[in-house]
Amino acid sequence: QKEVEQNSGPLSVPEGAIASLNCTYSDRGSQSFFWYRQYSGKSPELIMFIYSNGDKEDGRFTAQLNKASQYVSLLIRDSQPSDSATYLCAALNYGGSQGNLIFGKGTKLSVKP
Amino acid sequence: DGGITQSPKYLFRKEGQNVTLSCEQNLNHDAMYWYRQDPGQGLRLIYYSQIVNDFQKGDIAEGYSVSREKKESFPLTVTSAQKNPTAFYLCASSIVGGPREQYFGPGTRLTVT
């Protein structure tokens, strides 16, 4: 069964620190990976996606992908209390069921002022 | 403004009643999806559609039905056959090509008593 695993947390970091969120996936055929942020009671919001090995930066966010290790991470620099949310990792296999995402259960991040 | 709308935001129903959740998008996306989210759980795919007049079952389609008569609309009916219908329902859409990143609507919180 195809799975995406995340540490449920909570991960607590002080304001201004780097938050590191990790995700592993079981399907070696997965080709694109997505990070969503979900505030309590709200719907997921896409932060960024990555499909090439290495790093991809967007503002304070950096996604890292290592396909050999089947590992994806999201770094949040200069963490702010407004970053406190649950972060969902998702993987996509284009050859799978019509391009459907497999989601992890999410990691809850708490940024303390 | 382009986006996805879901209505209503909150819905209360008695057990044994069918209920239809609305999802509309003006992003010109071909693909649309319905997910269910339970507390502490990841998103689980109910149904998806890649093109008008065609849709496929996801991982937990039992007790649900959908239609796709227009590109912009993908309503979900929760039938009385669904054993545990109380949940947060999320609609998403994406293009069919490329990374296929999915964008979510605000969600409908359904409570059945």
Image: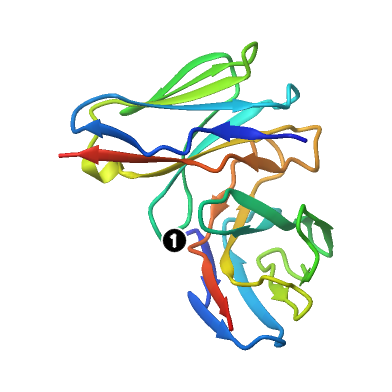
Question: Which residue is more in the foreground, B107 or A23?
Answer: A23
Total marks shown come to: 1
Residue A46 location (% of width, % of height): 48, 43
Q: Is residue B33 visible?
A: yes
Residue B61: quarter of image? bottom right
Residue A30 location (% of width, % of height): 70, 27
Q: Is residue A51 above or below residue B111?
A: above
The quarter of the image holding the C terminus of chain B is bottom right
Residue B24: quarter of image? bottom right
Residue at x-position 79% and y-position 77%? B81
A87 with respect to A113 (left or right): right
B33 with respect to B68 (left or right): left
Residue B85 location (% of width, % of height): 65, 72
The quarter of the image holding the N terminus of chain B is bottom left
Residue at x-position 47% and y-position 57%? A43
Q: Is residue B68 above or below residue A36?
A: below
Residue on which disc 1 sits? B1
Q: Can residue B66 be seen in this view?
A: no
Residue B4 location (% of width, % of height): 53, 62
Residue at x-position 38% and y-position 52%? A39
